[in-house]
Amino acid sequence: GYTANPIESEGSYTKALRSLNFTAEVMDGLLLRGAASETLMRPALTDLAYKRTANFNSFRFTDGNPNLKPTYAKQWELGLEKYFDNGGLLAASYFWKEIEGVVRSQLTGTVPDVTKYNANGTIDGVYDFDVYQPVNASGSYDVSGIEVVGILPFSMFTPMLEGYGINANYTMLDSSLTGQSTLGIPTPPVGLSDETYNVTLYYENEAFDARVSYNYRSEYVEGIGYEMYPIWRDGYGQFDISLGYRLTDNMQLSIKGINITDEATTGYTMHPSFPTMNELSGRRISIGLRADF
């Protein structure tokens, strides 16, 4: 709301970010790659703005924090890549990150004796309101994992499978961070799944191409709710298809299908017995015609 005493705040930070990359050919077609760097992610402007919003149902104020600092990360990666003459690739890498100053919502104070009014203007009561703000969490946490990538035209095995192939990738993560809610519930890092993978089978020639893909990510914390409990999104996978046919040199017909098995997106808070969502976006089929002039 309006204040007769405007509030001003300013801050600054200085950080030199270093990076190093190298590539070495171990043998013909086999590369060893390594990288090390320091990075930063600036806070969102909505978190920096000193504004206050009120939730009169949960007796809670949510403030911005103009004193937020960036989130810093130190990271390195080491991997091997094997290239084949027909365009195939096999690659595997291990990566590690140390992340410091993660922005998290935290109880920072209490405003006593806040008057709550009813819609008709009468007084509902006088309450104490908790104040939550985004803050830079103290300490740091590690994220490490492996990534495996394969691009394999089947013609590398036999000429009879010319045009067929598979693209696949798999990532597995592990994190040292487990916060704690006021209800004693673990709060892992927001947005990190332990496993993600994608597999695509394809066929293509000069006139026709077809692809069938499956994408999956395991459950993850979508956000942090009231009392700092995690809001979970269940593991989810879906099938997509894509077909294309070149009618002429300048015209191509395409058909695409998204979520063709009509999978649902589900989520919960605290425990699977407390669901928060069951969303059916449905399968989507699109037909397109492209012409080049």
Image (cartoon, rainbow, N blue to C red):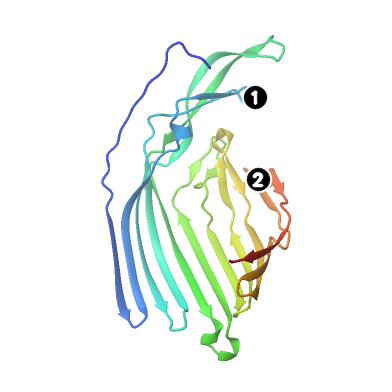
Quickly name the residue at label 1. Answer: 57
Q: Residue at x 30, y 70 (%)?
A: 23
Q: Secondary structure at mark 1?
A: loop
Residue 204 visible at all: yes
Q: Residue at x 49, y 47 (%)?
A: 189
Is residue 137 shown above or below 207?
above
Foreground pick, 219 / 65:
65
Q: Residue at x 53, y 15 (%)?
A: 112
**x then y, percent, for residue 205:** 60, 80
Specify whether 65 is left or right of 166: left
Foreground pick, 23 / 106:
23
Judged from this view, the residue extending furthest toward the top is: 122
Q: Mark 1: few, some, or many residues within 10 Å (few <14, many ≥20)?
A: few
Judged from this view, the residue extending furthest toward the bottom is: 159
Label 2 sits on what residue type? Tyr
Specify whether 143 is left or right of 211: left
Q: Secondary structure at mark 2?
A: strand
Q: Mark 2: few, some, or many residues within 10 Å (few <14, many ≥20)?
A: some
Specify whether 229 is left or right of 245: left
| Quarter of the image that includes the C terminus | bottom right
**x then y, percent, for residue 123:** 67, 10
Quickly name the residue at label 2. Answer: 268
Label 1 sits on what residue type? Asn
Is residue 170 shown above or below 18?
below
Q: Residue at x 38, y 54 (%)?
A: 97
